[in-house]
Image (cartoon, rainbow, N blue to C red):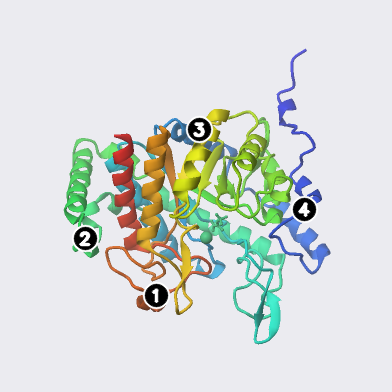
């Protein structure tokens, strides 16, 4: 008898909401379950933000990254804020990601996938549920999808209306992103217009300048011989991702689509599971094991290799290539000890993962003035070690995961412009972790490309 093509969609005991029967971490209790349920049902009825074809295409492209034929640049805000959804901020974010990707493509000579932490990166894990303000205990800020930033008891109360607001904000962001990637960025193909002066004092300035000249020449050449090709170049692929932390939001948008097996999270192309919610028997792993999207897994202390292997097996039992992006975030001082064993174990099991390095989350510290910051050199140290370790293990580091912005913020110290701790207060805007600013991001792209070339050319 012919097998029903939908049969393989039935994953044992799984539904988009089976996570509710498991221990839940990092999702606060909403004060009124009835209102929560009403908002959840409302969100379930709204149209999808992305399509299953786009998700399948991304997975296919990720599988080329896993094979060492391509590179993935994932980056964006630590926490997007509803109020900061404005034209200049989105334009600046897309612009810096595009410019970084041009640098990487030019230097590496392989296709580069752009994946924003954008259009849904609204929920944050926190160490403590509550904080004390003026002697009063209030909920900690958990991202705009859950509560407000201002430290007032009312505003910090988890509010399910924010699930709907988040959906609308993600939709507006995506709509603009799609318009921009269709045709809004012609001028970016003219790197002579990039503002690279800040790098003038940097030891690599000559190298940067030569690269920009060379990209400019290449663009002119393409424009001259085939204007049509150039207008095609203007269309850029841009994918979206966020941490699927507030499972009410993600599961309400997890659906079946006609004539395809499986369930898709149609709120983003890729979602990742955070370092604090990846317990094998917890709610988040239960949710992630049922979706068809490619998924990221953050791995950092505390973790064990054995647990990590079980997790990969659970989320990708068919060992599908392009499905899992393994994002390591050990910190510059721990990576040498931790990463080699993990690479060897994953290889032993034959898991076809995309290896990614998140050099941000293991390298955060507080200054004497109590600014949460990161040092450009520490970030670079972890990236350098990650490339060196993968190189010596004969494995392919195919991705980086960065917290960054296209704006001129002052949140991370160091870099060519020499930002120091005293300068942090000037333009410190982040709602959560410190991000590389425009100049630091471009500089980082040059340096990532240098490290990649050392390993793989
Ligand atoms: C993040 O990416 O913002 C984050 C919270 O990361 P992690 O889960 O790795 O701590
Ligand atoms: Co962060």
Residue pictured at 25% horizontal, 58% vertical: 194
N-terminal of the pair, mark 1 or mark 4, is 4
- Give me the C-alpha separation between circle 3 and circle 2: 38 Å
Image quarter hosting the C terminus: top left
Between 269 and 229, which is closer to the camera in this rendering?
A: 269
Q: What separation in Å lies between label 3 and label 4 (alpha carbons)?
A: 33 Å
- Classify 10 Å Cα crowding around label 1: few (below 14), some (14-19), many (20 and above): many
Residue 202: mark in rendering: 2
Along the line of sight, the residue nearer the viewer: 175 or 158: 158
Separation of disc 4 and disc 2 at Cα? 51 Å
Q: Nearer the viewer, mark 3 or mark 4?
A: 4
First in residue order: circle 3 vs circle 2: 3
Circle 4 residue:
23
Q: Earlier in the sequence, mark 1 or mark 2?
A: 2
Q: How crowded is mark 3: few (under 14 residues within 10 Å), some or many (20 or more)?
A: some
User: Marks 3/1: CA distance?
Assistant: 41 Å
Q: Do the residues labelled 1 and 4 touch (CB within 8 Å)?
A: no
The disc label shown at residue 363, or none: none
């Amino acid at each position: 008898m012919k097998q029903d093509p939908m049969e393989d969609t039935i994953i044992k005991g799984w539904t988009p909401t089976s996570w509710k029967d498991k221990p839940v971490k990092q999702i606060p209790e909403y004060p009124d379950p009835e209102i929560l349920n009403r908002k959840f049902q409302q969100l379930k009825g709204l149209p999808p933000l992305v399509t299953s074809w786009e998700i399948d295409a991304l997975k296919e492209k990720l599988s080329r990254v896993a094979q060492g034929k391509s590179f993935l640049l994932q980056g964006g805000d630590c926490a997007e804020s509803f109020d900061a959804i404005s034209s200049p901020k989105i334009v600046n974010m897309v612009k810096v990601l595009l410019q970084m990707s041009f640098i990487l493509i030019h230097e590496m000579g392989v296709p580069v996938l752009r994946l924003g932490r954008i259009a849904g990166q609204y929920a944050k894990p926190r160490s403590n549920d509550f904080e004390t303000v003026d002697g009063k205990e209030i909920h900690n800020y958990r991202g705009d999808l859950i509560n407000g930033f201002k430290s007032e008891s009312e505003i910090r109360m988890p509010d399910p209306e924010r699930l709907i607001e988040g959906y609308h904000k993600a939709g507006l962001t995506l709509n603009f992103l799609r318009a921009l990637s269709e045709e809004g960025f012609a001028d970016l193909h003219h790197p002579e217009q990039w503002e690279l002066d800040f790098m003038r004092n940097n030891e690599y300035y000559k190298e940067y300048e030569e690269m920009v000249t060379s990209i400019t020449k290449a663009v002119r050449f393409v424009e001259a011989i085939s204007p049509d090709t150039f207008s095609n170049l203007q269309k850029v692929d841009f994918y979206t991702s966020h941490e699927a932390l507030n499972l009410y939001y993600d599961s309400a948008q997890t659906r079946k689509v006609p004539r395809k097996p499986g369930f898709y999270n149609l709120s983003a192309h890729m979602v990742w599971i955070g370092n604090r919610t990846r317990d094998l028997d917890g709610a988040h792993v239960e949710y992630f094991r049922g979706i068809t999207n490619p998924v990221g897994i953050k791995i950092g202390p505390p973790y064990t290799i054995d647990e990590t292997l079980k997790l990969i097996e659970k989320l990708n039992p068919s060992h599908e290539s392009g499905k899992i992006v393994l994002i390591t975030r050990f910190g510059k001082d721990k990576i040498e000890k931790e990463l080699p064993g993990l690479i060897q174990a994953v290889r032993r099991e034959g898991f076809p993962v995309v290896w990614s390095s998140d050099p941000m989350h293991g390298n955060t510290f507080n200054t004497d003035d109590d600014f949460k910051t990161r040092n450009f050199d520490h970030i670079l140290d972890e990236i350098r070690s990650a490339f060196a370790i993968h190189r010596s293990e004969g494995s392919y580091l195919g991705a980086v995961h960065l917290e960054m912005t296209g704006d001129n913020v002052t949140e991370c110290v160091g870099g060519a412009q020499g930002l120091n701790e005293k300068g942090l207060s000037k333009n410190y805007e982040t709602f959560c972790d410190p991000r590389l600013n425009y100049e630091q991001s471009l500089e980082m792209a040059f340096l990532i490309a240098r490290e990649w070339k050392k390993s793989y050319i």
